[in-house]
Amino acid sequence: MSEDVKKTSIDFNNLKAGGFIKERGKDLFTVRLRVPGGRMPVSRLKKIAEVAEKYGGEFVHLSVRQSIELININFKSFDAVVAELGEGDQKVASCGARVRVPTACGGCEYNPNGLVDTQRSALEVDRKLFGTETGHHKFKVGFAGCPFDCPKSATNDVGFQGAIWPELDGDACISCGLCAKSCTEGAIKMGEDGKLVFSPDNCNYCGDCVKVCPSEAWKTVKKGYTVRIGGKWGRHPLVGTLFATFLPEERVVDFIACVLAWYKEKAEGAGRVRIGDIIIKEGPDSLLSRLRGGFPEYVVGKTIPPQVIATQVGK
């Protein structure tokens, strides 16, 4: 083997683990960039455009997981691409059996529907858990700021959805009915006596009643994340199911770490398998029991396994 061939010999699996993905073209790769929460400073975006124009093709790709992908990068340019991106503090993402870059909506910073700071949560998870090896398969985390769930959190291995629990101060209520009109779930209705009737089982934790109340009779008494576990997309999709409610924002990283530990243990020897399939195999009580040890006040009493999505309906 010539010296030149030795120098250009590369391990494609190791490259993919670091965010370099082999393309169809000879010697060409897609370079996936790390963009936690989908937030991109304008200064960094300019640097990415500069590097893409210098080393890549005629376009970049915005992935469904909020990352930017540089297309048609020759592997001989890897060092230069990484170095020049580093000048703008831009890092390469991760692939393989690792914790991936978390996705998130804008949260409560500027979105009027946002209930929690999803951006802060996504950045913290990225900083503390990104690239953690699972030993089994990819592990995706997503954050939605409210029950509209734009990031489709339930299709992640662990998905977080902003939630608040409202409580009515009857003495402060002026019976205007605005909360009942705004409640699309039918959790709040006006009684025949003009008093409000609240049906907790119908509440989806959106907090609209608190937002519209002119007398501040509705108060937020609990705030945090609704947590669903076991979701995935792909050839055999699953919808994650409810495992915790009102998990405080500051407990997110610890919660994910606990889920990861259970996943690594229970999937031992099972090969390339996602956590949702392990929950179906083991039963949700096993994971619930583990989580109760560290998060007893937030973990639900019971739940069901992740639910299969029949994508071939109508075939």
Image: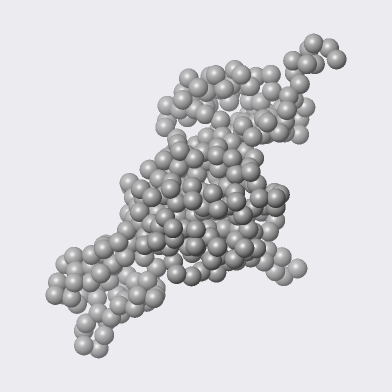
Residue at (64, 34) in percent of width and height: 17
Residue 51 appears at what percent x and percent y?
Answer: 56, 22
Tell me where residue 165 sits by quadrant.
Answer: bottom left
Residue at (83, 12) in percent of width and height: 2
Q: Is residue 63 in view from this perspective? A: no
Residue at (21, 84) in percent of width and height: 194
Is 168 situated left or right of 94 in this image?
Answer: left
Q: Is residue 92 above or below residue 306?
A: above
Q: Quadrant of the C terminus?
A: bottom right
Q: Quadrant of the N terminus?
A: top right
Q: Nearer the viewer, residue 154 or 63?
A: 154
Q: Residue furthest top?
A: 3
Tell me where residue 176 sits by quadrant.
Answer: bottom left
How many numbered discs sit on the rendered protein?
0
Q: Is residue 21 above or below residue 164?
A: above
Residue 287 appears at what percent x and percent y?
Answer: 53, 60
Is 155 situated left or right of 272 in this image?
Answer: left
Residue 291 appears at what percent x and percent y?
Answer: 47, 58
Q: Is residue 176 in view from this perspective? A: yes
Residue at (49, 47) in percent of width and height: 257
Residue 28 appears at what percent x and percent y?
Answer: 71, 27
Is 88 situated left or right of 236 in this image?
Answer: left
Q: Residue furthest right?
A: 1
